[in-house]
Image: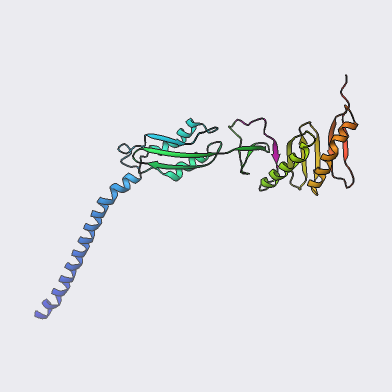
Amino acid sequence: MNATRESVQPATAAARTRDGAALRLAAWTIAVALVALPAVAVVNGWIGAQRWPLRTLRIEGKLQRVDPAALQKALLPYARRGFFAVRLDDARAAVARLPWVERAEVRKRWPDVLEVRVVEHRPFARWGESQLLSEEGRTFAAAGVSVPKSLPLLDGPPGREAEVMALYGESRDLFAAAGLDVRELALDRRGSWSLRLSNGIDVLVGSREERSRMARFSRLLPQLLAQRGDAALQRADLRYTNGFALTWGEPPKP
């Protein structure tokens, strides 16, 4: 019997030790949860939105094209979550989806300020049928925005915006000597260039030696127009080695 009691007592002590450790672990877990849960609730907006509300929207810089009312409407759902729970990345993404917004930054300032900085697209040209091209060479949707009628019309395959912008600038310099401006410039998917001048002449440049072809044509254009008097030049095809193919309209009737 003595041997049996001696073998049982160590096992009972070990069990009590394990039970005590488990109780202490459970107590620590509950204590940590009681401390952490309120913080988690505040950060997630479950509580505290009324105690730490965001009352002020501060817009840095002057907006020229972005509607302030639309900006406030986009940020309101995030501001309602309170100072600690507002999700700045989500708020920034909501602002970036607004028309004319190139990029946005959203910050919070204690105790109740939501601060937003918007960089607007600066339109350089119309792009294709439904987009605009910024001065940074980025395309953005033209839906819901007022497009200035004075913008030129450019077009080209995706990813070649910078190339189109560069040739547009060069072509304007070439034809300025003739007193004309370039109103349209397009690069098709086969790599062929075409443009329209401010006096309505359509110019087919082609896919090779586009700069030299335009330079030669722009030098001779004043002489060509002077030789034909009142006849209107409608179309010029520059895809020839030693000359141009010109299409003339009838002189206007007196």
Q: Nearer the viewer, residue 140 or 47?
A: 140
Percent position of residue 41, x then y: 32, 45
Percent position of residue 196, x then y: 77, 36
Q: Is residue 232 above or below residue 12?
A: above
Query: Which quadrant would the C terminus be assigned to in this image?
Result: top right
Query: Which quadrant would the N terminus be assigned to in this image?
Result: bottom left
Q: Nearer the viewer, residue 242 or 49?
A: 242
Q: Nearer the viewer, residue 240 or 168?
A: 168
The image quarter in which residue 226 lies: top right
* Chief secondary structure of the magenta portion: loop
Q: Residue furthest left?
A: 2
The residue sitting at 42% across, 43% down in the picture is 107
The residue sitting at 86% across, 39% down in the picture is 220
The residue sitting at 29% across, 49% down in the picture is 37
Percent position of residue 97, x then y: 53, 39
Q: Residue furthest top?
A: 254
Q: Let me know if residue 153 is in the magenta part.
A: yes
The residue stretch that appears in magenta: 146-155
The residue sitting at 23% across, 58% down in the picture is 28
Left or right placement of residue 204 versus residue 50 in this view: right
Left or right placement of residue 58 versus residue 25 in this view: right
